[in-house]
C-alpha cells in the first residue's frame, strides 16, 4: 500500500510539472486580464468560475476522448497547434491595435457594466479558455500522459488516470486563483503600469501564438 501511494504522488507530481508550462496559469492570467477590465468583483468571479469549469472540461475531453475525436475528423496535433497559434495571434493583435483609453467607472454606469459582462460571456470559452488557457499544448501533453496508462480496468490504469485527474484539478485551481487575483497585482502598478502590463501582455499573446503556429509548421514539415 505505501508503494501505491508513493506511485500515485509521483505520477501526480509529474502531471502537474508537465501541465504547468503549457497551461501557464500565471502568464495566461496576465494575457487575458484586459477582458476583465470593466467587470465588477461578482461578475469577474462568475466569469473566472466559468473559465475554470471550461478548462476542466477541455482537459477531461482531451484525456478521455481527444485522440478519438481527432482521428474521427482526421486532424493531427500539428494542425491543432497551427490553428490554435493563428487564433491566439489574432487575439493578441486585436489587443495591440485596440484603443486602451478607459472610461471612469462612474461614467460607465450599471447598464454598461451589465452589457460588458454579457459581451464577455460569449468569449469565455473561445478564445479565453480555448486556446488562450488550454490549447494545443495542453491537449498534446494530456495525450502523452494518457498514453502511458496500462490496459483499461487494471489497477495501473486507475492509478495513472487518478493521478492525471488530480493534476488537472490542481492546475484548474491555479487558473481560478491567478485569474481572479491578477487585477489586484496589476493595480499595485498604478494606471500607467496597468497600461504597460496590458500592452506587454498583448505583445506576448501575439508572440505565443506565433510560437505555437511555428511549432505546428515544423512538426507538419518535419523541420
Image (cartoon, rainbow, N blue to C red):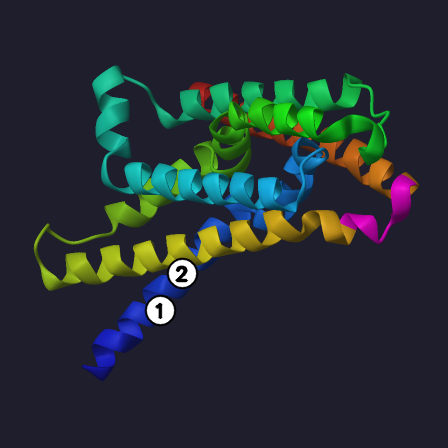
Residue plotted at (56% across, 18% down): 86
Residue 96 x, y percent position in the rendering: 77, 22
- Name which quarter of the figure residue 30 lies in: top right
Graded by Cα atoms within 10 Å as few (under 14), some (14 to 19) or many (20 or more), the crowding at tag 2 reads: some
Q: Are marks 1 and 2 in contact (CB under 8 Å)?
A: yes
Graded by Cα atoms within 10 Å as few (under 14), some (14 to 19) or many (20 or more), the crowding at tag 1 reads: few
Q: Nearer the viewer, residue 206 or 189?
A: 189
Residue 66 x, y percent position in the rendering: 28, 33
Local SS, label 2: helix
Q: Is residue 168 visible?
A: yes
Residue plotted at (83% across, 33% down): 106
The range drawn in magenta is: 186-191
Local SS, label 1: helix
**Prevalent SS, magenta region:** helix
Q: Nearer the viewer, residue 105 or 125?
A: 105
Q: Most extreme residue toward the front, as rendered?
A: 110
Q: Give me the disc on residue 10.
A: 1
Residue 20 x, y percent position in the rendering: 51, 52
Q: Which residue is mark 2?
A: 14
Amino acid at each position: 500500500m505505501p508503494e501505491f501511494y508513493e506511485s500515485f504522488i509521483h505520477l501526480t507530481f509529474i502531471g502537474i510539472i508537465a501541465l504547468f508550462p503549457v497551461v501557464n496559469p500565471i502568464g495566461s492570467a496576465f494575457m487575458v486580464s484586459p477582458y476583465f477590465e470593466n467587470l465588477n468583483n461578482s461578475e469577474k468571479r462568475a466569469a473566472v468560475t466559468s473559465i475554470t469549469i471550461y478548462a476542466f472540461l477541455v482537459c477531461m475531453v482531451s484525456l478521455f476522448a481527444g485522440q478519438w475525436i481527432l482521428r474521427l475528423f482526421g486532424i493531427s496535433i500539428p494542425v491543432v497547434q497551427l490553428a490554435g497559434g493563428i487564433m491566439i495571434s489574432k487575439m493578441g493583435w486585436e489587443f495591440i491595435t485596440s484603443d486602451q483609453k478607459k472610461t471612469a467607472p462612474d461614467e460607465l454606469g450599471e447598464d454598461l457594466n451589465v452589457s460588458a459582462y454579457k459581451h464577455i460571456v460569449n468569449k469565455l470559452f473561445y478564445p479565453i479558455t480555448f486556446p488562450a488557457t488550454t490549447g494545443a499544448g495542453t491537449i498534446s501533453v494530456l495525450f502523452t500522459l494518457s498514453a502511458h496508462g496500462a490496459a483499461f480496468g487494471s489497477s495501473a490504469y486507475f492509478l495513472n488516470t487518478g493521478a492525471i485527474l488530480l493534476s488537472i484539478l490542481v492546475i484548474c485551481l491555479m487558473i481560478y486563483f491567478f485569474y481572479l487575483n491578477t487585477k489586484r497585482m496589476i493595480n499595485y502598478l498604478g494606471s500607467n503600469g496597468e497600461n504597460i502590463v496590458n500592452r506587454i501582455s498583448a505583445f506576448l499573446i501575439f508572440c505565443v501564438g506565433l510560437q505555437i503556429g511555428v511549432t505546428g509548421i515544423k512538426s507538419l514539415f518535419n523541420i
